[in-house]
């Protein structure tokens, strides 16, 4: 299999996840922040490179959202854990809500595929905005934890992410209700 540059970046993002967790758990907060920022940057670059070079692939279309979810769910869970001595933690309710949104989207697509046949469910602008706000929220939280100071800015980003999470969830729901899923070829 010939991996495109974009797919290689996506795989790199997945490989950075365990490094991020290990660095964070062992107290290397600066390196964990840097690792997470590099992983977030690969999310921006992989799609851009695929579009610019005309190398969109079925593997990339499948792998990119999987890598996103793995990175973000891992970040949310680790930054919610109570026993790591962070000055700033993500609220449990927020982490549960974000993960529940993703589970609901996957479950909805599964039900639609079973009920009316295979459909594609491409990303929406609101879903992309949600991913971006999650990455920024993670960076802000990690940054203040690196400084070892509590910052109310973390909650500002949590609530901004909450808003776009709800908007994107309703947007996906409206797409499904309006039949906005395309038949898979």
Image: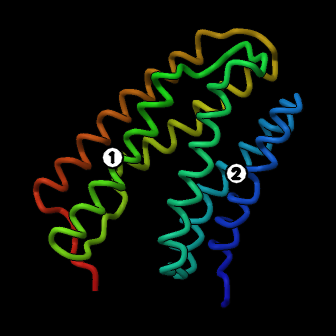
Colour setup of the view: rainbow
Residue 171 lies in quadrant: top left
Residue farthest to the bottom, as pictured: 1
First in residue order: circle 2 vs circle 1: 2
Q: Relative to residue 61, is residue 106 drawn left or right?
A: left
Residue, disc 2: 39
Q: Residue at x 26, y 49 (%)?
A: 172
Q: Looking at the picture, does residue 77 appear above or below residue 105?
A: above
Numbered disc 1: secondary structure: helix
Report the Cα–Cα distance between label 2 and label 1: 25 Å
Image spot of residue 66 (x, y percent): 53, 60
Residue, disc 1: 104
Image spot of residue 65 (x, y percent): 50, 60
Q: Residue at x 24, y 61 (%)?
A: 111
Q: How many marks?
A: 2
Image spot of residue 91 (x, y percent): 54, 19
């Amino acid at each position: 299999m010939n991996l495109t540059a974009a797919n290689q970046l996506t795989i790199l993002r997945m490989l950075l996840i365990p490094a991020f967790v290990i660095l964070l758990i062992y107290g290397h907060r600066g390196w964990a922040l840097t690792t997470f920022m590099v992983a977030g940057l690969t999310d921006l670059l992989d799609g851009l490179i695929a579009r610019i070079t005309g190398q969109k692939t079925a593997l990339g279309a499948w792998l990119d959202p999987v890598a996103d979810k793995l990175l973000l769910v891992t970040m949310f869970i680790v930054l919610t854990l109570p026993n790591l001595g962070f000055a700033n933690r993500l609220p449990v309710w927020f982490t549960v809500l974000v993960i529940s949104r993703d589970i609901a989207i996957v479950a909805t697509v599964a039900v639609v595929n079973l009920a009316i046949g295979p459909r594609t469910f491409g990303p929406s602008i609101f879903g992309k905005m949600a991913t971006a706000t999650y990455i920024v929220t993670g960076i802000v939280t990690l940054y203040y934890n690196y400084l070892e100071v509590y910052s109310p800015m973390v909650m500002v980003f949590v609530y901004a992410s909450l808003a776009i999470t709800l908007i994107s969830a309703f947007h996906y729901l409206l797409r499904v209700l309006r039949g906005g899923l395309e038949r898979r070829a």
